[in-house]
Image: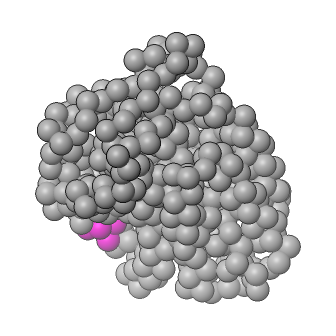
Amino acid sequence: MRVNRYSEFKTGWPALLSATVGSAVGVTALLFYSLGSFTAALQKEFGWSRAEVSSSFLYTTIALVIFAAPLGWLLDRFGPRRVAIISVPGLTLSLFLLSQFEGELIYFYLLFALAGLLGSGTTSIVYTKAVNSAFFTSRGLALGITLAGLGVAALALPPLVTGFVQSWGWRTGFTVLAVLSLLVIPFVFFGLKGSGPRADSAPELVGANRADALKSRAFWTILAGFLLVGGSVPAIIPHMVPMLTDVGLAPASAAGIASLIGLGVIVGRLSIGFLVDRFFAPFVAAPLFLITALGCLLLMWGGPGLAPAAAIMIGVSFGAEADLIAFLCGNYFGLKRYGFIYGLIYAAFSIAVAIGPIWAGSFFDRTGSYNGALITVAVMLTFGSGVLLTLPKNQPFASKARTEQPVAEPDELTV
């Protein structure tokens, strides 16, 4: 019997809405997309360099990576709702503590690490598990919608936070982030109800075991490809506001242009989500990554006049990584050990994301220009696209219908 591709949205929309809101106000979105808005104020008050300010998110990432394996186990054991309900207040507390910061740079870093530790249950690892469990025939589109929440954050946070920082100081900016982190509470409590592993409406979870996943070529190809991609585009996102103010734009104008990255993120994630349900995912992703590479070159050569177009082009592929990782993990490895497998790849990807702004800031601190960083990003995106194009086309757990879960061939991943 033919299954309506979009019928899953009738029953899965509460989880989808909750996951989308959660993605927009999770630890990654709130700290990563707002960091550029704090840079000038923190430099002025504490005398830190841009590389030092950009390094803050690395400590969040280190904490996320350290807790990735335990988080994956908790997620597979208790489900997304319980994990998120505990983690959201922890993230709020850590953001409030940042607003009260007084001291040395190392203590500032430790507060960012605390945000990563307490807020680890607000990342896409948690929310994509809920969506992957509720959607099968439209999984790509559902994940694209979910992670478009990050695009909303990228669109809204730079001008919002910059406005508060300019008017009332950077402490108020972190207080605003703390308040925003609480917005997801009612959605998690009601929308993710029944989304855990024992939900009666969910099919029995099948998938590769840990050992077979770690031995597969698909796992290491996905990991290598997204290390290159993760270390590239995110390297320049926190630097967009200072990069544009360096060429003479006012902070508010620079923040407005930087927020256009969020528009690109939304377009990229919805486009990716729609297309990967119909075509082999790397064939969809590679052209978008190359568009972003071109956007980096356009930003370097086009000046302020072309900066809005370049920002949108940069956002297009920045809107593709996390949902592509989630989609590919679901299709190649299934949901049985999804939290563990996705957690490992996402942890490595997150390290690359966190290191990127540091080396980009170091480029500027040494040379007084971001041109070398922009060229490096374009090269890394090109290589990352090539790696992902080598993925095998056979995806053992790419369900064609809600009630149909393909079984791997004997020489492929086994349950």
How far across and how far down the image is residue 107, in percent?
41, 46
**Residue at the right extreme, as displayed:** 301
- Using residue 47 as the reference point, say whether residue 229 is left or right of it: right
Residue in the image at 19% along x and 57% along y: 191
Image quadrant in which the C terminus is located: top left
In which image quadrant can residue 288 be found?
bottom right
Question: 211 above or below 235?
Answer: above
| Residue 59 visible in the displayed image | no
Task: Name the spot of residue 16 as percent of width and height, x first.
Answer: 31, 58
Residue for point 34% across, 26% down:
206
Magenta-drawn segment: 176-180
Q: Residue furthest front?
A: 1
Residue 230 is situated, as x and y percent measured from the top left of the image, at: 62, 46
**Residue 8 visible in the picture:** yes
Q: How many marks?
A: 0
User: Is 407 part of what is drawn in magenta?
Assistant: no
Q: Residue at x 40, y 56 (%)?
A: 5
Q: Main secondary structure of the magenta part?
A: helix
User: Which is nearer the eye, 146 or 293?
Assistant: 146
In the drawing, does residue 99 fall left or right of residue 375?
left
